[in-house]
Amino acid sequence: MVVAVGDTNAVLGVDLAAVKAGWIFAHVESGLRSFDRYMPEEINRVVADHIANILFAPSIQAVLNLLYEGVEPRGIWLTRNTVVDAVKMVMPRVEKERR
C-alpha cells in the first residue's frame, strides 16, 4: 500500500506509479476542493481522489464532494483534520518546553 498526503505534484506522481504497479493507493486529505481548475493543485487533488482505492476525507464537506463526483462510497473514510491531530499531539511538549 502507498499512502500520500496532500495535493502536490509529488502526490500525483506517487499515485500514478502506485496504481500502474497494481498497489493499493490511499489518499489523505481527499475531497478537498477549491473549484479552481486553473490551480495545478486542484487537478492533482481530483486525479488522486479518482484513482485512490482508499480516501481519507478531513470533513463532511470533503466526503460530499467525493460522492458528488461519483467516487465509490465504500472507499471513503471520514478522518477529520490530521494537521489538527498532530498539533494537539505536540502541544503538551511545546507548553512544557516553554516553561
Image (cartoon, rainbow, N blue to C red):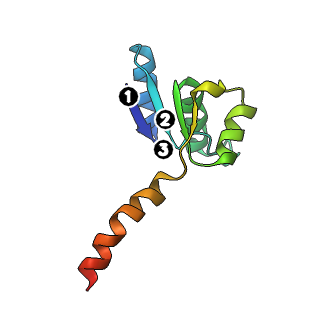
Of helix, strand and loop, which one carries label 1? strand
**What's the residue at 24%, 78% (across, down)?**
97
Q: Which residue has dot 3 on it?
A: 6
Mark seen at residue 79? none
Alpha carbon distance from label 1 to label 2: 9 Å
Q: Badge 1: how crowded within 10 Å, few (<14), some, or many (20+)?
A: some
Residue 62 spot, x, y in % from top left: 65, 44
Picture layout, residue 84 above or below residue 25: below
Picture layout, residue 63 above or below residue 69: below
Name the one closer to the observer, 73 or 66: 73
Of helix, strand and loop, which one carries label 2? strand
Picture layout, residue 55 above or below residue 81: above
**What's the residue at 42%, 30% (across, down)?**
13
Q: Are circles 1 and 3 on residues that touch, CB within 8 Å?
A: no
Mark seen at residue 2? 1
Tag count = 3
Amino acid residing under circle 3: Gly
Which image quadrant: the C terminus? bottom left
Name the one closer to the observer, 16 or 1: 1
Residue 84 spot, x, y in % from top left: 47, 60
